[in-house]
Every structure is written in structure tokens, then in C-alpha cells.
């Protein structure tokens, strides 16, 4: 037996019968054929930043650390191994004068994991990160290497860009990048009234807009990121350390531990935290603005919904938070994305608002998450595939218009369910 595997949050663990570190698609094909012959299921794992058991297996665990290098760059098309972490991708692109058009706020995920679960950032003109895929290659259940793009096997392309690891193992991805650019970040505290009174303008008039709400208060932190010609207002090193390292991680982690031990202190701490925030404006390379360190561990649920449903969902969430028998220590994150055409993308066919809820590790969360999910489901909510949810295939089929088309592709590529596990059995059907 291999050593046990766990995800970043520690809420998912597994022990595989064996682990493999293939260096080429051919080696990976041999691993898959051997697993099938032995009756073992297979899952590829990345950095473990999914909160669901999407990568858990008691069969064969595939590590892609030997398939994580730069393969080629042709103009703005960059092909990399699927095991490359986003942090390494960002550094690689910077060295070649390029950047991802948009990113989420964490860069620890592998490219394959981020893309397969529908990872996204915020910005009215941007879909999830998978919309930047020009082509991809994966090894399927019979050990065959398959390539797809918008013009080559387009149905597979529409299914594979967000695939929850159910179609095969990604080996390489070609990304449509842009010339490196600078963002001006404007971050400042405000109130919910400030958000709601100008929400349409906030979203439409900024390249990237999001806000964080502090439970038990009417206070928010608004973040506006916009492209500017040059980095003429860099953030002082001491200020970055103070805000992003010391306050956001060290101090916040201590506050969470206090709240977990003494729950009655949580509302007061939340109010103090919200009032303690100060405004800051600075410029930096795009990936340094998009991505920030996250060392305080948590569990998370995130739902995408039609933008017009956001206010009803948010007001309902505030009621849930106030009525829970335990306290919520983490701010609630709200982001916005464009529509896309990827079959299992949360933004398929519609402009989305996303609401992400979190809870500190070791603190109770299930009632919070289940009640939020029950609120969002009738509003057209779609759960982020890498974040906790309790949905099943029957309910998700109603949420995704091309759900049946995805399953048909899966039936062709993996009829024996080599890449299945308990999570895919629940959300896609066995």
C-alpha cells in the first residue's frame, strides 16, 4: 500500500493500492492498461486544493509531477505539461513576456486540477480559466493519447475542458495567453449599501470586481482591478508583508483559533476585523495582484448562479448565518464571470455571480453548507466542482443543459469507469 494522501484542507484522505509517476503519455498509457487489467480504478491528483474527494482513490494514484514542464511557445499559444502548478506557469509566462488573461486568487493548484474543476477568477468579460484552452491532450481508458480542440474532436473538447477527471488523464494543455500586463488594484472597505447601490457599475466599469462580506456586520471589502500601462505605484514591501502575510494569515489565523475555542467572540472579532481594514491602491504584474497567499486552512462551498439571482441568494445567506447554532469565522466572497460554452462549466450559457462560503478547519460547517445549497438549488445554482457540495446526478442534470451530452462522451471514452470514484458516481451517476 502507498502512503496516505490528503488534500490541502485535510477533509479528504485516501490510500491507494499503488502510485505512479509517469514521465510520458506512453508510460501513462501503460499504467492505465495495467490498472484496468488488475481491476483497479485510477485517479490523477494535483496539489489537493479541491475540497471534494474528486481525486480520491483506493486504486492507482497518478502523480503528474514528471509531466510539468514547458513544452513549447508559439506566439501567444503556450503548451505545458498538465502537472505544472499555476505558480510555476505564471513565472514561466512572465519570463517570456506573457500572462494568463485572468486568474483566481490562489496559484497552488496544478493546471490540470484547476481546469478540470472549472476554477475561475472575477471579471465581467472573462469566463472560467478553461475558456483560455486552445487545445489539450489526454490519455483515455484504453491507454490511447487523444488530442482535441475547437476544430479537432470538438465534442470531446467541449466536454474535456471541465471534466472532473472523469474522461481520462490530462497530459498537456495549450493555453491562449496575452502579453504581460499590469493591474492597478484598488481595495477599500465599504458597506453593503455601497455594493448594492452601484453593483451594475462596479461590475461593468472595472476589469475585475469582487467583494468580501464580513458576517454579523454590514461591512465589506471591495476589490477593483484594472489594466494600466505601467507599474508606477508599486506596493511597499513592508505593506505587502503587513497586509497579505501578517494580518491576512498570522493575525487572522489566530482570530480563527480564538473563535473556534470561544465561539461567542466571533461576531465581535468580525466587526473589529471589518473596521480595521484600510484602503490601499497599488500596481503590480497581473499575477501578483490576482493571487495572494492562503495559509489559514478552511473548507469551502461555492455556487455560481444567474447574476439576477444574487441579491435574493445573498439576503437568504445573511438570514442563514444569523440563525445558525454556531458562528461563521470567514468572510463571504462574491465574484462575477462571463458566459461560456463549456458543457460542465458553471457559467455555461449565462453570466454568473459566484458566492463562496468558508469555515475554519475544525469548526462546524455542515448545516451552514447544506442550508446554503438548499437556498441556491432552486435559484439555478451550480456548485463549483472542486468545492464541497451534496448534489447528485439527478439534480445536476437539471442545472446543466448539456449534462447528457457530457455523459455520452464519458460512456464512449470510459465505458468501464476506470476513472470513476465515489464522487463521480454521485455527481455524474455510476
Image: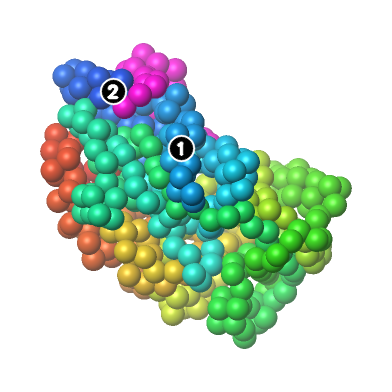
Horizontally, is 239 left or right of 212 in the view? Answer: right
Residue at disc 2, secondary structure: helix
Please say if 24 is above or below 202: above
**Residue segment shown in magenta:** 1-26
C-alpha span from label 2 to label 1: 19 Å
Q: Nearer the viewer, mark 2 or mark 1?
A: 1
Quadrant where the image shows the C terminus:
top left
Residue at the (52%, 47%) spot, across then down: 299
Please name the residue that numbered disc 2 is placed on: 26
Residue at the (51%, 41%) spot, across then down: 109
Q: Residues within 10 Å of mark 2 (few under 14, many from 20)?
A: some
For residue 283, the mark is none
What predominant SS class does the magenta segment belong to?
loop
Please name the residue that numbered disc 1 is placed on: 72
Horizontally, is 33 left or right of 380 in the view? Answer: left
Residue at disc 1, secondary structure: strand
- Residue 64: % across, % down: 42, 28
Q: Is residue 417 visible?
A: yes
Residue at the (28%, 65%) spot, across then down: 399
Depth check: 312 or 119 in front?
119
Residue at the (49%, 31%) spot, across then down: 69
Q: Residues within 10 Å of mark 1 (few under 14, many from 20)?
A: few
Tell whether position 7 is magenta: yes
Quarter where residue 334 is shown? bottom right
Please say if 114 is above or below 150: above
- Residue 155: % across, % down: 21, 54
Quadrant where the image shows the N terminus:
top left
Q: Residue furthest bottom?
A: 197
Q: Residue furthest front?
A: 75
Amino acid at each position: 500500500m502507498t502512503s496516505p494522501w490528503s488534500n490541502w484542507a485535510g477533509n479528504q484522505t485516501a490510500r491507494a493500492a499503488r502510485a505512479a509517476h509517469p514521465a510520458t503519455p506512453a508510460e501513462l498509457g501503460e499504467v492505465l492498461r495495467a490498472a484496468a487489467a488488475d481491476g483497479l480504478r485510477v485517479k490523477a491528483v494535483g496539489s489537493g486544493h479541491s475540497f471534494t474527494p474528486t481525486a480520491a482513490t483506493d486504486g492507482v494514484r497518478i502523480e503528474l509531477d514528471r509531466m510539468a514542464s514547458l513544452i513549447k511557445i508559439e506566439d501567444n499559444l503556450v503548451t505545458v505539461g498538465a502537472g505544472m502548478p499555476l505558480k510555476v506557469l505564471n513565472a514561466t509566462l512572465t519570463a517570456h513576456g506573457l500572462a494568463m488573461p485572468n486568474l483566481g486568487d490562489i496559484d497552488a493548484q496544478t493546471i490540470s486540477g484547476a481546469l478540470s474543476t472549472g476554477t475561475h477568477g472575477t471579471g465581467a468579460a472573462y469566463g472560467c480559466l478553461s475558456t483560455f484552452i486552445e487545445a489539450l491532450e489526454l490519455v483515455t481508458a484504453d491507454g490511447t493519447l487523444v488530442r482535441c480542440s475547437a476544430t479537432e474532436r470538438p465534442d470531446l473538447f467541449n466536454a474535456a475542458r471541465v471534466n472532473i477527471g472523469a474522461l481520462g488523464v490530462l497530459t498537456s494543455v495549450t493555453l491562449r495567453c496575452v502579453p504581460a500586463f499590469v493591474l492597478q488594484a484598488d481595495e477599500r472597505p465599504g458597506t453593503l449599501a455601497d455594493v448594492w447601490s452601484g453593483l451594475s457599475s462596479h461590475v461593468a466599469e472595472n476589469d475585475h470586481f469582487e467583494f468580501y462580506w464580513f458576517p454579523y456586520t454590514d461591512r465589506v471589502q471591495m476589490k477593483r482591478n484594472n489594466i494600466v500601462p505601467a507599474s508606477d505605484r508599486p506596493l511597499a514591501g513592508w505593506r505587502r508583508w503587513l497586509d497579505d502575510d501578517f494580518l491576512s494569515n498570522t493575525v487572522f489565523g489566530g482570530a480563527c483559533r480564538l473563535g473556534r475555542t470561544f465561539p461567542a467572540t466571533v461576531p465581535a472579532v468580525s466587526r473589529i476585523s471589518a473596521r480595521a481594514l484600510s484602503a490601499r491602491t497599488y500596481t503590480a504584474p497581473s499575477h501578483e495582484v490576482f493571487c495572494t497567499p492562503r495559509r489559514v486552512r478552511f473548507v469551502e462551498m461555492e455556487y455560481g448562479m444567474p447574476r439576477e439571482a444574487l441579491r435574493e441568494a445573498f439576503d437568504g445567506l445573511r438570514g442563514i448565518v444569523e440563525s445558525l447554532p454556531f458562528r461563521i469565522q470567514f468572510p463571504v466572497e462574491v465574484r462575477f464571470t462571463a458566459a461560456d460554452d463549456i458543457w460542465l462549466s458553471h457559467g455555461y450559457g449565462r453570466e454568473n455571480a459566484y458566492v463562496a462560503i468558508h469555515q475554519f478547519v475544525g469548526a462546524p460547517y455542515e448545516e451552514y453548507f447544506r442550508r446554503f445549497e438548499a437556498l441556491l438549488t432552486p435559484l439555478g445554482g451550480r456548485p463549483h466542482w472542486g468545492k464541497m457540495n451534496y448534489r447528485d446526478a439527478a439534480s445536476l442534470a437539471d442545472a446543466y443543459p448539456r449534462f447528457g451530452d457530457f455523459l455520452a462522451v464519458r460512456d464512449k471514452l470510459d465505458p468501464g469507469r476506470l476513472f470513476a470514484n465515489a464522487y463521480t458516481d454521485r455527481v455524474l451517476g455510476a
